Image (cartoon, rainbow, N blue to C red):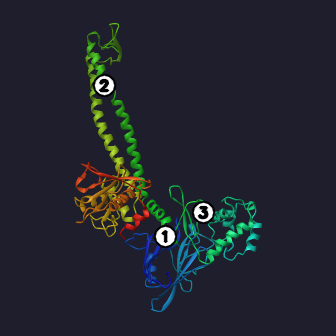
Amino acid sequence: MALGARIEKVYQPERDAVVLQMRSFEGGKRLLINAGSANPRIGFTEIPMENPQNPPLFCVLLRKHLSGAKLLSVQQAGFERVMTLTFETRDEMGYTCERRLYAEIMGKYSNLIFTDGEGKILAVLRPVDFTTSSLRQVLPGMRYELPPPQDKKDPLTVDRETFLALVEGGGERPADKWLTATFLGVSAAVAREIVYRATGEVDTPLSALEKNALADHFLKVYDNVREGRFAPSVALDEKEKPLEYAFLPLTQYGTYRPFESVSALLDLWFGSRDQEARVHQRAADVLKLLSNAHARISHKLELQRGELALCEQGEEYKRIGDLIVSNCYQLQRGAGRVTLTDYNDYREDGTFGTVEVELDTRLSPTANAQRYYKKYNKSKTAKVELAKQIAIGEAELAYLATVQTALDTAETPTDLLEIREELARAGYASRSKQALPGKKSGTSTYAEYVTTNGYRVLCGKNNLQNEHITHKIAERSDFWFHAKNVPGSHVVMLLEGKEEPDAVDFTEAASIAALYSAAAGAPMTEVDYTTVRNLKKAPGGKPGFVIYHTNWSAVVSPDKEAIARLRKK
């Protein structure tokens, strides 16, 4: 479907990822080639990615050679994990020539190599010299050579007799392990699926199964591959969380979801993983800062709560002072531990109770009473101040929780820079030396959605964006949404002169608020919503904190894919 397409633009949104934006008679497509060690792959994608202001050198060279180029062919050598993309373009003199891009999708050894038509390497995403590998070097100026082939069989060229002969020499290993070790391109999930279809179990030993049954299912799977019949699917657990994916139905899990295209499957599987990897890679300093701040404030709160518990003894200090005053006539200077009559403790036998009290021998009885009264007054003042400080500390922890939630939902480098800027303004970090790329002061890169009936919905992805959309953009009659009692994004549905939205629009806006909150993984989430006129900024509060007393509530179950379709590209 992409052969003959023209390359319109070349992007490198991540250090290890290149995006080729191409256009053909069928429309525009974006081909993602990820050569990172975490999630290497190649395929079309619909996931939006933010590009750096200054493109890397590898991206600059690809743009020089591939802008306007036509994709001639895409080839894979057997089941080796190397894809060759051949392009027709023009050289510096204007003559037609070929260029090739080799995508080596090999786990931690993944790489992208760009060559001319003769195989001379022009650029390498990750150069490999003698210090890195003594077996295979990949450097500009060298001639490209394919990686050493694996000592495995091609499953498309194996017939029944050969397969049965291989099984006979397979030994006592589990059948799925034997399949992955013997044949090229057989993943662990596919191997287990073949064994499950043949035996009803996934961990059957090779010696305990029926050889012909295993051969039947193996050959049937790869007959479908040979003829281009694919049924991509994702296996799901009880909570419908993705477990495995493959090019065939994964019946071994019982519950699986089919996909119309492998590209859509890969977007679902790798989308959240890529985002988490980007956040942890780029925001390591912010994560460390938040962790240290949380630990410091939590330790301080623990000490303050301990001191507050001691302040509860204040009434006892007052009681002792009163006892000393009431018994002062019988006390002498220099007395240490004394027994005092408690006139408030009248007993049935007509006597009063007694209390033993420690006195400072250097002070007079009156001075000892004053000493206990001072302890009482000090504990009263400390109790009030500690309550204030504990409230401040708890508010700080609540604020850090909102920043952590914003970090979890961050999608672009700009989002991370805004979070750093927010922490700098709040006094938790020094101001970032990096400027927000292409961003004027006072603007925000909030997410924008359009509901079924055409209402615009704005979603802040950090506290600065929350502040901006709630207090700068929204009108008093617009509707505001927030997940109840948990950190999350401010979501505003703009009326823009229209009538009050239908229930479906409210549900979609509430689902967006639930998705961008700390309760995103819950099956059901309660969301508060009200008009913006009912919101008030918390006096002296952190950015994004508001107070409201009049609101409605809705319980929603957010659908990530349905919400993604509403997002404005």
Out of 192 and 115, give the one closest to the viewer: 192
- Estimate the x, y position of residue 516 in percent, counting from the top left: 38, 58
- Estimate the x, y position of residue 196 in percent, counting from the top left: 65, 62
- Estimate the x, y position of residue 209 in percent, counting from the top left: 73, 62
Answer with the quarter of the image where residue 10 lies.
bottom left
Q: Which residue is mark 3?
A: 251
Give the amino acid at mark 1. Ala
Q: Secondary structure at mark 3?
A: helix
Q: Residues within 10 Å of mark 2 (few under 14, many from 20)?
A: some
Out of 565 and 142, give the one closest to the viewer: 565
Viewer-side label of 3, 1: 3
Would you say 189 lies left or right of 464 here? right
- Residue at 27% across, 18% down: 322
- Residue at 35% across, 17% down: 357
Asked if the residue under mark 1 is in contact with the one under mark 2, i.e. CB atoms within 8 Å, the reply is no
Q: Which residue is mark 1?
A: 264
Q: Which residue is mark 2?
A: 315
Q: Residues within 10 Å of mark 3 (few under 14, many from 20)?
A: some
Judged from this view, the residue extending furthest toward the top is: 349
Would you say 479 lies left or right of 16 here? left
Out of 416 and 406, give the one closest to the viewer: 406
